[in-house]
Every structure is written in C-alpha cells, then in structure tokens.
Image (cartoon, rainbow, N blue to C red):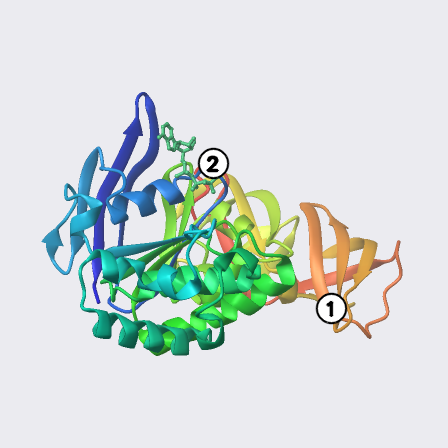
C-alpha cells in the first residue's frame, strides 16, 4: 500500500500545457477521484503517476520516495482501463494468472492466488471459460482480477466503467467500492461523472484546463465549492448563481440583493464594490410567501419525491427543489428564502469563493 504525494506536477506537450502545476496528496488506502470535463488533464495526471508519461516538472513521491523519473515497471502500480484489455485467446484463469506467471511465480502459489482473487470478485465459477463470451461486467471483473493478483502498491483506474450501460454501471460502481473497502488498496480513479466521483470517492480533485480547482472530500466540495467552476460542475441540478454588484465587508453576514438583505455565512475577507455571484443549491431555496426576495414561477418538473421549480428572478434564473406535494402555479410570483448557512459568495471576475 502507498501514500502518493503530488507536488507542482506539470506536463507540456510541445507548446500545449496539459497539466499546469498540480499538488495534492493521496493517503494510504484512499479511494481518490480525479474529476473534470473532457480534456482537463485527468488521464495525463494518472499516466504520470503510473509512469506511462514523464512529467515536464514537479514531483511524484510514493511513500516518501521520488519516483517521478522511474519507468512504470519500477513503480509497482496496476492500471485498469475502460477497454478491458484481456487476452482473447486465453480463458479467465490464464488471463488472471498471466502477470504472476510472467514474473516466474511458482505454479502452486499462482493457483492459490488466482483462487483467492476469484473468490473476492465472485468469479470462481467462470475461471475455465473463454473470455470471448463473457458479459461486460464479467470482463471487467476479470480485468480487475488481473490487476489485483499482483498485490500492487496502488491501482490507477481510467474510467473503468465508461463502457458499461447506465444501470449496470451503478451496480459495478458499488461493487468496486465494496471491493476497495475489503482490500484497502490506494486507488486513483479518473472520471468525468460528478455523481460517480461523489458516490465512490473518499477525496476528489476537481480539474479544469489542466488546473486543480479544488481538492477535498465530496462533502467539502459540495458544501463549500472553492470556485464558480466547481460550484457549477458538482450537483444536479447545478447550484444557482445570482449575479449582482456589491461589496464584501469582513465579519458582515449579509449581502444586499436588489434592496433585500440576504443573510450569508460570516465572511472573513473584504472586497470593494465589484461584480459578485451568490451561489445557492436548489435544495436550499425555500418558497415562502413571507420572503421579501421574489421570483416568478416559469415551470415545474415532477421527480416523484420532489419537484424542481424554475423561477425568474431579478438576478438570474433560480431552480428550487420542493416537496412534490407543494402546490405551485406557473406564472405566480412567490417569495424565495435561502438557507443562510449554505450560501456561497464568489468574485465574478476571478471565480474564487469568498471565505
Ligand atoms: P478525456 O476524458 O477526454 O480523456 P482528460 O481530462 O483525461 O480528458 P487528457 O487525456 O489528460 O484529458 O488530455 C489533456 C489534454 O492534453 C487534451 O487537450 C489532450 O488533447 C492533450 N494531450 C494528451 N496527450 C497528449 C499527447 N500525447 N500529445 C499531445 N497532446 C496530448
């Protein structure tokens, strides 16, 4: 098992910078997510940790040792890819045992290890089947088996569930997480799916354009997004953004929105008048006639246990998650109150959150 420390990691491909100086720590035994939109540098980061790509600058420490310039073969890391790279002409047993056989591990030891891995993954009954006829899920289990069997220091997984359909994907995600909890192996997992990252990860790094926007637990990232990008990327429906001009007074715990005082968490930072964005999650918008801030109901979307109500307000469109039983009429003007402790305030120019 291993702790992985990333310091100012940078990767340039010619004139293009894919990763612009990332720093974060993956603790021993963590299930760690690299999350972000397509092209943000997740895979490049993962490949540098695995040793499949050398950094332009920066450091990768494994258990305190600098491995940045070491080839993949000397890092003791197993990769699991989206495309289950199995050997098609071999059966399941031979696919799983291959890494041990090629290392010259004695036969009896190989047999015992393969049996143990098959039991962990629940695939003992298919060990002698050819891989060609297996379902997507079983192929993925075999690919995992081949990674696990070596007892590597850490696993690198690049969108391993990307090729599965939505329903099965969720099931495999639970299975993977349960497997991780049993084995406790340090795992770095790349995904562009924020829900998958939130559900599975102990920690998440959110990347955008090669930059680490935020690093924290799923709850820290959801409750206290550090930037407008993170606030927008995490959560469904996304956080609402109310745009206005105002000042931030240190210690003050409110903002003025079109003449209405909105209570916010206490802010330590100060800022002269500027363009600001107030962020509020749909579940923290409460429709109440008593509230002074008003909006006109444009639509409501029924979701079974709740409904999403879209309102037109003076500072932007707002979505509110309300109980499905709450009666609403399109066209009505209603009051909106925001749960103060949950609000976020951002500088519209820099996109950074005030703390
Ligand atoms: P995706 O989910 O689409 O793979 P990603 O976040 O994993 O996205 P990367 O694959 O890390 O992104 O790519 C980041 C950027 O670096 C992209 O713009 C990509 O085109 C570029 N890139 C990656 N590998 C190379 C390479 N070998 N040569 C040139 N550019 C590259």
Using residue 354 as the reference point, say whether residue 255 is left or right of it: right
Ligand 1 shows up in which quadrant of the image? Answer: top left
In which quadrant is the N terminus drawn?
bottom left
In which quadrant is the C terminus drawn?
bottom left
**Number of residues whose C-alpha sits closer than 10 Å to that of mark 1, classed few (under 14), some (14–19) or many (20 or more):** many
Instruction: Report the front residue among 313 and 231.
Output: 231
- Return the x and y of residue 97 as percentages of the image width and height: 31, 64
Snapshot quadrant of residue 152: bottom left
In the image, which is nearer the foreground, mark 2 or mark 1? 1
Q: Residue at left 14%, top 48%?
A: 67
Instruction: Report the front residue among 310 and 247.
Output: 310
Residue 19 lies, with reference to residue 98, above or below; the image says: above
Q: Say which residue label 2 marks.
A: 349
Using residue 248 as the reference point, say whether residue 309 is left or right of it: right
Mark 1 secondary-structure assignment = strand
Residue extending farthest left: 65
Mark 2 secondary-structure assignment = loop
**Number of residues whose C-alpha sits closer than 10 Å to that of mark 2, classed few (under 14), some (14–19) or many (20 or more):** few
Visible residue check, residue 253:
no
- Return the x and y of residue 15 as percentages of the image width and height: 32, 21
Q: Residue at left 87%, top 57%?
A: 332
Visible residue check, residue 33:
yes
Q: Residue at left 68%, top 45%?
A: 316
Measure the C-alpha gap from mark 2 to mark 1.
32 Å
- Return the x and y of residue 280 as percentages of the image width and height: 59, 58
Q: Say which residue label 1 marks.
A: 322
Residue 200 lies, with reference to residue 312, above or below; the image says: below
Mark 2 or mark 1: whose residue is earlier in sequence: 1
- Return the x and y of residue 129 as percentages of the image width and height: 49, 66
Mark 2 vs 1: CB contact within 8 A: no
Using residue 169 as the reference point, say whether residue 208 is left or right of it: left
Instruction: Report the front residue among 136 and 340.
Output: 136
């Amino acid at each position: 098992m291993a702790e992985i420390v990333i310091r100012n990691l940078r990767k340039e491909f010619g004139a293009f910078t894919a990763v612009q100086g990332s720093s974060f720590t993956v603790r021993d035994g963590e299930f760690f997510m690299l999350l972000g939109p397509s092209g943000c540098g997740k895979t490049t980061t993962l490949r540098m940790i695995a040793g499949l790509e050398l950094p332009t600058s920066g450091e990768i420490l494994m258990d305190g040792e600098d491995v940045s310039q070491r080839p993949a073969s000397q890092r003791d890391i197993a990769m699991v890819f989206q495309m289950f790279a199995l050997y098609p002409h071999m059966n399941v047993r031979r696919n799983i045992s291959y890494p041990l056989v090629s290392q010259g591990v004695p036969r009896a030891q190989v047999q015992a290890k393969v049996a143990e891995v098959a039991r962990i993954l629940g695939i003992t009954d298919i060990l002698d089947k050819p891989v060609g006829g297996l379902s997507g899920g079983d192929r993925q289990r075999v690919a995992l088996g081949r990674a696990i069997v070596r007892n590597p220091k850490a696993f690198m997984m690049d969108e391993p569930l990307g090729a599965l359909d939505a329903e099965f994907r969720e099931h495999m995600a639970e299975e993977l997480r349960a497997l991780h909890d049993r084995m406790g192996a340090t795992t770095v997992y790349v995904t562009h799916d924020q829900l998958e990252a939130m559900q599975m990860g102990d920690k998440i790094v959110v990347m955008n354009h090669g930059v680490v926007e935020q690093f924290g637990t799923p709850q820290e990232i959801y409750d206290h997004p550090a930037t407008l990008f993170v606030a927008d990327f995490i959560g469904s429906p996304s956080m609402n953004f109310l745009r206005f001009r105002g000042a931030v007074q240190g210690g003050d715990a409110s903002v003025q929105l079109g003449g209405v005082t909105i209570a916010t968490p206490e802010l330590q930072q100060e800022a002269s008048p500027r363009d600001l964005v107030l962020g509020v999650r749909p579940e923290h918008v409460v429709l109440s006639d008593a509230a002074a801030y008003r909006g006109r109901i444009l639509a409501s979307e029924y979701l079974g246990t709740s409904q999403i109500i879209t309102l037109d307000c003076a500072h932007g469109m707002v979505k509110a998650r309300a109980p499905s039983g709450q009666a609403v009429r399109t066209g009505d003007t209603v009051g909106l109150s925001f749960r103060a402790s949950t609000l976020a305030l951002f500088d519209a120019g820099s996109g950074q959150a005030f703390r």
